[in-house]
Image: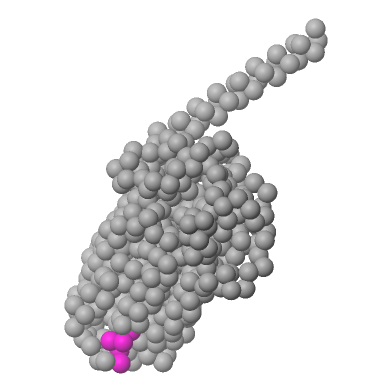
Amino acid sequence: MAHSHEMTSRKPPGIRLFGGITALRTYQTLVLVLTFVAYTCFHMTRKIPSIVKSVLDPQTKLGSSPWGRLHTKNTLNIGWLPFNTIDGSALLGEIDVAFLAVYSVGMFFAGHLGDRMDLRIFLTIGMFGTAVFTALFGAGYWLNIHNFYYFLVIQMIAGLFQAIGWPSVVAIVGNWFGKSKRGLIMGIWNAHTSVGNISGSLLAAFLLKFGWGWSFAIPSLIMVAVGLLVFVFLPVSPEVMEIDIDDGEISSVKDTTKEPLLEPGQEVKHNAVGFLEAWKIPGVAPFALCLFFSKLVAYTFLYWLPFYISHTPIGGEYLSDALAGSLSTIFDVGGVLGGVLAGHISDRLNARAVTAASFMYCAIPALFLYRTYGSMSIMWNICLMFITGMFVNGPYALITTAVSADLGTHSSLNGNSRALATVTAIIDGTGSVGAAIGPLLTGYISSSSWSAVFTMLMAAALLAGLLLTQLVCSELKGKATSNASKDVADAQGTYSDEV
């Protein structure tokens, strides 16, 4: 009786009020839509600084000539102190790395807490906190704040709340979907990253003409509205909703005995997994380290691509800050396709490591071609940016979604259902350390040479692929053994038929 009351109290108030939902598929659709929109908002607010960056620091434009000759561009915008000084790019880079450093550290704690709290409440807190501190950054425009440490501290606290988002949404989706098509489903679902980047870019670029503060304020209001929907309607798990996952309908059994991601016959355990225990799960460490370098590349593009486009002549001309921000969304459009392809291919091959490593190796020539030929014309830039986004974001999407969910329900856990958020946080938290380092290094290196920045990115992509070598070999060996066994079985069957 007490257990039934506890489950009822954890149901979303909107579902308790309206009721009427009886089908598993309806709950799964609701979960996908709400978590998709929720994390779209996280990335929408995260993308804003990269769009506003060129307005805050409209300094000397660095050309792409072999001699690195400096070009200047006439502009009515005089920037915003303290970012319109000679070291403005470095200061913006420091804010980026401070945000991502707190984000990566906070990720580990968020995952630990997520496995011990009501994820609906936890996610709502993350959304409201992110919205408040994103708005406070933009408030500097109206309050005429020019203190570097104000913007630094605001972004660091925003990073702390942003860290709550990812382990929460992955754990919730993982609770509702089995493993067979997890790569494809999560590959499509993970388009929220690119959709958030695109919507954040377009919205922030559009609002720049009203003043850069509005580029932070309006997305913050949108995030608050979505946060309210999450709090009112998001179902966390089949167990909380008292659904029998076997028949897909509301179960009369008060305590379900199976979780959707566990293998048949496994007994569910509800003790949260420790941090060190989660690190020891086979595959967690190599995928986490691979994501370190993968996110280094992806987040360098996230934070610096609009700046790079506006500071590099394309077809002999510089683009406006707003147009550069809009053009940079092509990278994320390619990322949507890359995430879906990586998920689908890994499902068909049943080989996550082979797929992720292959995409990272393909990203190396894509990065080289974009740097070398992307400035020839707008069309070349768009095509090469799309291809680069596809190969860079493909493995990033795969590792942070399907791989994290796979490892969070690994057989070594013996059916423990309370490891999803912790494992997700470990993998993405480690990746976020790389995400902090990439933009920081870019802030310093780009002032001398963008070619050096791309060399760094290509080296990171190579290391990301190499770190999965052992897992790739294991997957290929497993495939070979499986095929050999199948051939032997087929041969024996043929011999029996002849006899």
Residue projecting furthest to the front: 1
| Percent of width and height locating residue 132 | 35, 79
Residue projecting furthest to the top: 499
Q: Is residue 113 left or right of residue 396?
A: left
| Closer-to-camera residue (394/42) | 42
Using the image, determine if residue 178 lies above or below residue 189: above
| Percent of width and height locating residue 386 | 52, 62
Question: Majority secondary structure of the magenta segment?
Answer: helix
Using the image, determine if residue 161 lies above or below residue 437: below
* Location of residue 142 (image quadrant): bottom left
| Percent of width and height locating residue 357 | 45, 43
| Residue 58 visible to the viewer | no
| Residue 106 visible to the viewer | yes
Residue at figure coordinates x 58%, y 56% from the top left? 242
| Percent of width and height locating residue 353 | 47, 41
* Location of residue 471 (image quadrant): top left
Would residue 140 be counted in the magenta stretch? yes
Q: Which residues are magenta?
A: 138-142
* Location of residue 176 (image quadrant): bottom right
Would residue 476 be counted in the magenta stretch? no
